[in-house]
Amino acid sequence: MRFPDAPEPWVDLSTGINPHAYPQLDLPRDIFTRLPEPLRSTELCRVAARNYHAPSPANVVAAPGTQILLPRVMSLVKPGRALVLAPTYAEHIRAAAIAGHRSNYVGTFEALFDADLAVVVNPNNPDGRIVERAKLRELAYHMQSKGGLLVVDEAFMDVGPQEASLASEVEACRAIVLRSFGKFFGLAGIRLGFALAPQDLAQRLDDELGPWAVSGPAMEIGIAALSDEVWQNKMRRRLSEEVGQLDRILGRAGLSPIGGTSLFRFVETQFAKAIFDALGRAGILVRGFQDLPSALRFGLPASMGDLRRLDLALQKIATRRDSGVAAE
């Protein structure tokens, strides 16, 4: 264990998952003892299409998390050159390689036009970068013209600018949009995600997944949460308020965020490693990056107690730094 003497309980700020989960449902026992009903799968795709603004339920594929969809989506085009807009989540490169593509990162959006398979995370993880819908649309049509494919991972679009989402145009653009359920609803453990795709590609993905890909409990929770617009709107307002509190705490410690979403904040500092280690010794886990040594990502604290604990730890680190004492 890296920080064996850290005080408990740990404050885990290393993820971008909503710490305020959708409330637990009282599910009937037979949901756990029988196979999922096809009609409930149809209903899940219907409410997902409405919630994500997909053209129709036939454009929606439900899966046990977007992770399992990645290599299947990457296999929808023949192996070629896969380019992923960086910095971002590492799994896209891995999935493209599994599908037989020659995979590389690129640092500019324009470089994606040379790809056979182009991948954009929007809003981006870890820095919250947003690519405008018009630019994505242009790239999608370019990829379509040469038999390629654009994949847009919108895992954090529930808390992103809806005008940037390409979900409503997947049929016309022949692009794939991935949507994660667990992050915004705070239920990563139930494993539920969606691919929004042209109908023929959606059918291919659905055929590959086979029957009963999504569990009965996950279906019922997904249907309830995706239909609950009141909870969603209240949660977006709550997250916006709480991330403002996080911003103020980070700012007081000289770590003003330069990006992120209302589920996480991205900062850059020459003291990133020292801060990561000092917070770890204080029982607070944040996200560091091997390829971005000057960057840190702070998830949203679950409570005022966790927020105060982070504030005290950061103030102690800042005091030691300002006095010229290395963080220990």
Image: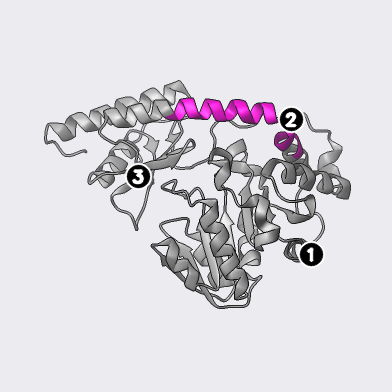
- Are there few (<14), some (14-19), or many (20+) residues within 10 Å of tag 2? few
Q: Amino acid at mark 2?
A: Leu
Residue pictured at 50% horizontal, 48% vertical: 123
Quadrant containing the C terminus in the rendered view: top left
Which residue lies under the disc numbered 3? Answer: 296
Whether residue 302 is visible: no
Residue 327 higher or lower than 148, as above or below: above
Q: Is residue 213 left or right of residue 146?
A: right
Report x, y in % for residue 282.
33, 33
- The mark that comes first in sequence, 1 or 2, is 2
Report x, y in % for residue 80.
55, 78
State the residue in front, 80 or 220.
80
Q: Is residue 188 left or right of residue 297?
A: right
Which residue lies under the disc numbered 1? Answer: 207
Question: Mark 1 to mark 2: distance in Å?
Answer: 30 Å
Report x, y in % for residue 195.
67, 55
Residue 233 higher or lower than 126, as above or below: above
Look at the numbered disc 3 and give the secondary structure of its residue. strand
Residue pictured at 62% horizontal, 28% vertical: 233
Query: Which marked residue is nearer to the observer: mark 2 or mark 3?
Result: 3
Question: Mark 2 to mark 3: distance in Å?
Answer: 35 Å
Q: Is residue 143 left or right of residue 86?
A: right
Which residue lies under the disc numbered 2? Answer: 25
Does residue 228 belong to the magenta stretch? yes
Residue 281 higher or lower than 208, as above or below: above
Question: Mark 1 to mark 3: distance in Å?
Answer: 40 Å
